[in-house]
Amino acid sequence: MTRHLLLRFLFTLPALWLILTMVFLLVHIVPGDPVQQMLGEGARAEDLQQLRHALGLDLPLHVQYARYLAGLVRGNWGRSFRFQTPVLRVVLERYPATLELALVGLLVCAAIGIPAGVLSAQRRGHPADRAVGFFTLLGLSVPNFALGPVLILLFSIQLGWLPVSGRGGPQNLVLPAVTLGAALAAILTRMVRSSMIEELSSDYVRTARAKGLPESAVLFRHAFRNALIPIVTILGLQFGTLLAGTIITESIFSWPGIGRLTVQAIQARDYPLLQACILMIAFSYVLVNLVTDFIYALADPRIRLQ
């Protein structure tokens, strides 16, 4: 298994290289001058040229790219134009907040999606199934940038139950986690429902019921366990999506994570910081996929990783 995971990681290195190359090219093609952002509109041309030379932005694009790759190999991700500190330090300071929000959002997603999917499959065609289908459609139809402000207006401004923004105690996590997990819970519910319907129609389930096993044992000990593979797959993909999709949610709730830092780097044209944020998100996505492969073998002993 270790050899398989190592090979999978090596196969992802070209993908990571392609991602960082595309990001490097895009941030240099997008209009905007970071030097002008740093010195302001009234800066003299001599000062602009001097700072541009100090940052290496007057070099040809291929030379800047070669320097960037050489720095990555040495563990030097660059220095932030805005914060004037190594970008790796800035990203690592913000990463725990994003990871915390993504984990809680995934828990919200699983807490809603798995029971709702099992209930919908068990009550297929009944009013409970139709009610779950309605709410999943509603969850898929409302985007994060619309759901977040609605939750703030209702629970923070009108009722005063939860804080509007910022990172502090558990109460600060509720609204952004629900905003992140709601739409993904709708996707997970549909996946759990379809997987459970397929398993509940299997011969081994009919045999278990014929033996007089309780319905809970049939559902969770037999059917749900065999339906775990697609569920684990979608959970792994959703966790990667949560890490990458916190940009809007963190901006709405002023959450001090990588997503909000990415927006700040774009606004300031902070090339090294933006590249570091995207690279960290991409690396996290790859790591989540590797962990998902490992969970496959734990969830289903029939899987053998060669």
Image (spheres, rainbow, N blue to C red):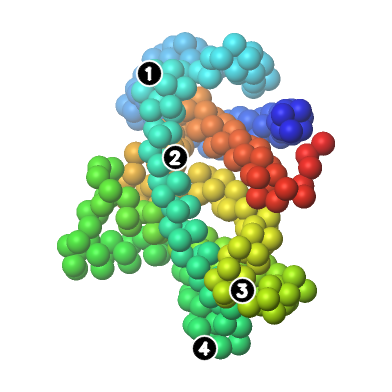
Foreground of the two, 271 or 155: 155
Task: Point out the tag, 4 or 2, that comes first from the N-terminus.
Answer: 2
260 vs 211: above or below: above
Task: Point out the tag, 1 or 3, that comes first from the N-terminus.
Answer: 1
- The residue that label 4 is drawn on is 127
Foreground of the two, 265 or 9: 9
Q: Position of residue 149 (x, y in %)?
A: 33, 62
Q: Amino acid at mark 4?
A: Pro
Residue 84 is marked as 1
Residue 99 is marked as 2
Residues under numbered marks 3 and 4 in contact, where contact means CB atoms less than 8 Å apart: no
Task: Point out the tag, 2 or 3, that comes first from the N-terminus.
Answer: 2
- The residue that label 3 is drawn on is 213
Q: Amino acid at mark 2?
A: Leu
- Report, in whole angstroms, how far the alpha carbon at label 1 lies from the one at label 3: 65 Å
Residue under the point 48% across and 15% down: 55
Q: Is residue 72 visible?
A: yes
